[in-house]
Amino acid sequence: MKYLIVGLGNIGSEYENTRHNIGFDIVTKAAQELNVPFKVDTLGSIAEGKWKGRSLFFLKPSTYMNLSGKAVLYWMQKLKIPIENLMIIVDDIHLDLGKLRLRDKGSDGGHNGLKDIQNKFGHSNYCRLRVGVGKDFFPGQQVVYVLGKWKKEELDEVNTMIDKSVNAIKNFCTIGLKFTTDNLNK
């Protein structure tokens, strides 16, 4: 079985270690755990690894966050990944820092990356792992907040959240969405 795990983010050093790039950070860590490197390819960087007999493809789109749908659709078609074997990992300002929420469908929640994916698919019935980055910003300052770097005092929680997310990826690919969701969303 093949799985496509997509971490949303923006390319460029100015976006490294920002809240908005937590999706990139999570798929990077997952690929590191499987000892597979990313290679620059069409519409993104991709890494392929094996986990318990499954082929996992990790994608970091190079289209920038708000145009992620093009890369996701391209790689799903190229790799012949069924929609039920797709996971999108995205930052979420509506969740407290460290909180993870896994869903099999839902709204874009105001996230432009998810909005573009849903526009390209024509529906919102795909797995998404929402990663809580907190909401410690003044009204109207969310863009500045999500593009901001992590605070030193947040890093332990961020690293724990990344590790939990990597475990969720592995579980999604082995025991399935329902059991992973039941365990993660407690």
Image: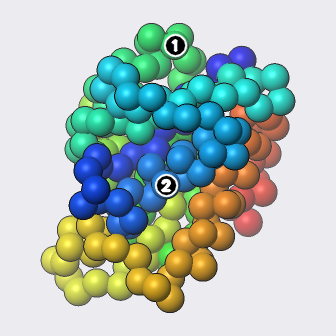
**Which colour style is shown?**
rainbow
Front position in the image: 172 or 29: 29
Q: Which three-letter amino acid code belongs to the residue tagged 1?
A: Leu
> Could you tell me which residue is drawn at 60 percent across and 69 percent down?
159
Q: Give me the C-alpha separation between circle 2 and circle 1.
A: 23 Å
- Three-letter amino acid code at disc 2? Asp
Q: Nearer the viewer, residue 7 or 44?
A: 44
Camera-nearest residue between 29 and 102? 29
Horizontal side of residue 157 vs 14, given as left or right: right
Instruction: Identify the image quadrant of the N terminus.
Output: top right
The secondary element bearing badge 2 is classed as helix
Q: Are marks 2 and 1 in contact (CB under 8 Å)?
A: no
Q: In the rendered view of the protein, which quadrant contains the C terminus?
A: bottom right
Residue at figure coordinates x 45%, y 58% from the top left: 22
The answer to whether residue 124 is visible is no
Label whose residue precedes the other's in the sequence (2 or 1): 2
> What residue does disc 1 label?
79
Task: Classify residue 170 as left or right of residue 32.
Answer: right
Vertical placement of residue 81 versus 115, above or below: above
In the rendered image, which residue does mark 2 sit on?
Answer: 25
